[in-house]
Image (cartoon, rainbow, N blue to C red):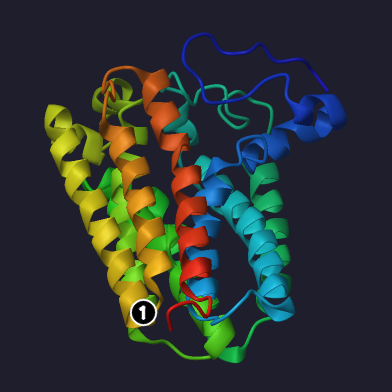
């Protein structure tokens, strides 16, 4: 396997981590293609699934809950990888013009588009194997999500709000988790889905501020460019809608007061993201974006606590 120079300047590719230490060099480009070296996207895809599972499961998490949580964990890894691979195939010419992404496997020449396509098919087959372990209703919902997976990468070419389409795709687990437990859809899951979309609008706008100069130069659209220096109050609004939506979903599901205490702590984490955020500092944008993993854990803990037989 030839050696490729690391790109200069700002990049979100991690070098020298466990991937490079533990895996054969020939696999490195594929694991980077699936973003396995950068798990934050998998966490952001997985948390709405786990939130929904917990919301639909009264009492302590039991063996079935843990089994479903593991299934969704594997599904999130492979489907996030498949989505990233599709994105990189479609965006390979654009990625070559953006400082943060020009070192990705396809634009840097480490993997051809045909090889990436074969890798994507393999990931989709793994995702199908996971999906077939769920209920028929959940399987149908999972198949429907493919429309969002394959259309999202094109949205940055046609709308200033591609982050909204990412939200539609990334939070589909909020309905999938509920369906996997109860084999139906109900108001708490649908409200949670809407709250997740607002959450994605917030965190991915922060993320998009890393690329705004390159995006403007090559003609790619994003909420970061659309909102510009006014992004902070908009994101505050998105995050307020997130908290309100999650709170409403918990109230509709009959969660106890411990849930709302945990939600307040989660709201504090979102407030921290905006306090002191430097819009024009790519490193700070990435730091704030990655911190959403902690928000995900806080909300999961709040929902689990809210389902315990306390004050009910």
Vertical arrangement, residue 266 with respect to residue 219, above or below: below
In the rendered structure, the answer to whether residue 131 lies left or right of residue 260 reads: right
The answer to whether any part of residue 284 appears in the image is yes
Q: Position of residue 61 (x, y in %)?
A: 64, 74
Q: How many marks?
A: 1
Vertical arrangement, residue 308 with respect to residue 9, above or below: below
Q: Position of residue 52 (x, y in %)?
A: 48, 72
Q: Position of residue 281 (x, y in %)?
A: 33, 17
In the rendered structure, the answer to whether residue 27 lies left or right of residue 41 reads: right
Vertical arrangement, residue 181 with respect to residue 42, above or below: below
**242 or 136, which lies in front?**
242
In the rendered structure, the answer to whether residue 19 lies left or right of residue 78 reads: right
Q: Which residue is mark 1?
A: 188
Please state, as top left, top right, bottom left or bottom right, where the N terminus lies in the image: top right
Vertical arrangement, residue 285 with respect to residue 115, above or below: above
**Mark 1 Cα shell of 10 Å, populated few (<14), some (14-19), many (≥20):** many
Local secondary structure at mark 1: helix
**188 or 121, which lies in front?**
188
Residue drawn at x 83%, y 24% as measured from the top left:
21
Residue drawn at x 71%, y 32% as measured from the top left:
29
The quadrant in which residue 69 appears is bottom right
**38 or 226, which lies in front?**
38
The answer to whether any part of residue 112 appears in the image is no
The quadrant in which residue 197 appears is bottom left
Residue drawn at x 18%, y 35% as measured from the top left:
231
Please state, as top left, top right, bottom left or bottom right, where the C terminus lies in the image: bottom left
């Amino acid at each position: 396997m030839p050696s490729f120079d690391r790109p200069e300047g700002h990049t979100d590719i991690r070098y020298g981590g466990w991937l490079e230490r533990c895996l054969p060099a020939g696999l490195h480009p594929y694991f980077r293609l699936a973003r396995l070296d950068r798990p934050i996207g998998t966490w952001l895809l997985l948390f709405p699934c786990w939130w929904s599972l917990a919301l639909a499961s009264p009492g302590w998490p039991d063996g079935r809950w843990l089994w479903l949580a593991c299934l969704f964990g594997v599904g999130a890894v492979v489907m996030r990888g498949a989505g990233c691979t599709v994105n990189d195939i479609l965006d390979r010419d654009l990625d070559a013009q953006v400082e943060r992404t020009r070192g990705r496997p396809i634009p840097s020449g480490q993997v051809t588009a045909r090889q990436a396509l074969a890798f994507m098919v393999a990931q989709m087959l793994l995702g199908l194997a996971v999906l077939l372990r769920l209920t028929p209703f959940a399987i149908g919902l999972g198949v429907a999500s493919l429309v969002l997976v394959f259309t999202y990468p094109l949205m940055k070419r046609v709308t200033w709000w591609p982050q909204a389409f990412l939200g539609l795709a990334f939070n589909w687990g909020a309905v999938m988790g509920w369906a996997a437990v109860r084999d139906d859809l109900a108001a708490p899951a649908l409200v949670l889905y809407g709250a997740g979309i607002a959450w994605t609008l917030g965190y991915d706008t922060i993320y998009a501020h890393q690329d705004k100069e390159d995006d403007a130069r090559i003609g790619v659209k994003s909420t970061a460019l659309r909102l510009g220096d006014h992004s902070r109050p908009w994101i505050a609004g998105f995050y307020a809608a997130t908290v309100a939506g999650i709170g409403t979903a918990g109230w509709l599901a009959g969660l106890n007061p411990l849930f709302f205490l945990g939600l307040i702590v989660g709201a504090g984490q979102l407030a921290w993201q905006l306090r002191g955020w430097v819009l024009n500092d790519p490193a700070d944008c990435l730091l704030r974006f990655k911190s959403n993993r902690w928000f995900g854990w806080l909300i999961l803990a709040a929902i689990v606590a809210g389902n315990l037989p306390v004050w009910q």
